[in-house]
Image: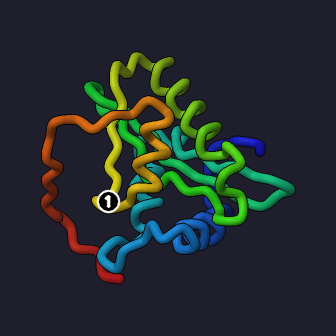
Amino acid sequence: MRLRPFTSADEASVIQLWNDCGLTRPWNDRAKDIARKLTVQPEMFLVGEIDGRIVASAMFGFDGTRGWVHYLAVAPAHQGESLGRAIMAEGERMLTAIGCPKVNLQVRSGNERVIGFYRALGYLPDDTVSLGKRLITDAV
């Protein structure tokens, strides 16, 4: 797999990947999420290609205190091939290079397979409760 930064030509393929992986929810406009990410650290929005096809993606970012990972996805046909591990390693490398001391991520409760994936990479549950408040409602 070749990792590289996202380009606007990747949008449809990345959204399809997210749909195929079950990452999307009706209340999130995927195109708007991409557009928003491209305004902040766009170089940290990575895609992975095999034979010219996008098979992985992840959005990384650093807010000055913590790093975050969003939309990590690996095409179902390529899961189990360590592609998720590879894109996470590159994101962690990028975050470390800019001085990020800790990275956080969120997994939907009950998604034990994905929680197991992150545990295998050394991620552990924090003693926290994730809270959220929608500030902008995306019409999808």
Residue 98 place in picture, x, y as percent: 45, 20
Residue 50, relative to residue 123: is it above or below?
below
Q: How dense is the environment of label 1, judged by Cα within 10 Å: few (below 14), some, or many (20 and up)?
A: few
Residue 130, relative to residue 30: is it above or below?
above
Q: Residue at x 43, y 71 (%)?
A: 24
Residue 85 place in picture, x, y as percent: 60, 39
Quadrant in the picture for residue 17:
bottom right
Tell me which amino acid carries mark 1.
Answer: Arg
Q: Which of 65 and 125 lies nearest the eye of the viewer?
A: 125
* Screen quadrant of the N terminus: top right
Residue 91 place in picture, x, y as percent: 53, 34
Q: Which of 58 and 7 lies nearest the eye of the viewer?
A: 58
Q: Is residue 128 left or right of residue 56?
A: left
Q: Is residue 13 left or right of residue 32?
A: right
Q: Secondary structure at mark 1?
A: loop
Residue 66, relative to residue 1: is it above or below?
above
Q: How is the image coloured?
A: rainbow
Q: Is residue 137 left or right of residue 6?
A: left
Residue behind mark 1 = 108
Q: Residue furthest bottom?
A: 140
Q: Which of 64 and 96 lies nearest the eye of the viewer?
A: 96
Residue 57 place in picture, x, y as percent: 58, 52
* Screen quadrant of the C terminus: bottom left
Q: Residue at x 51, y 43 (%)?
A: 42
Q: Residue at x 30, y 81 (%)?
A: 139
Q: Residue furthest right?
A: 51
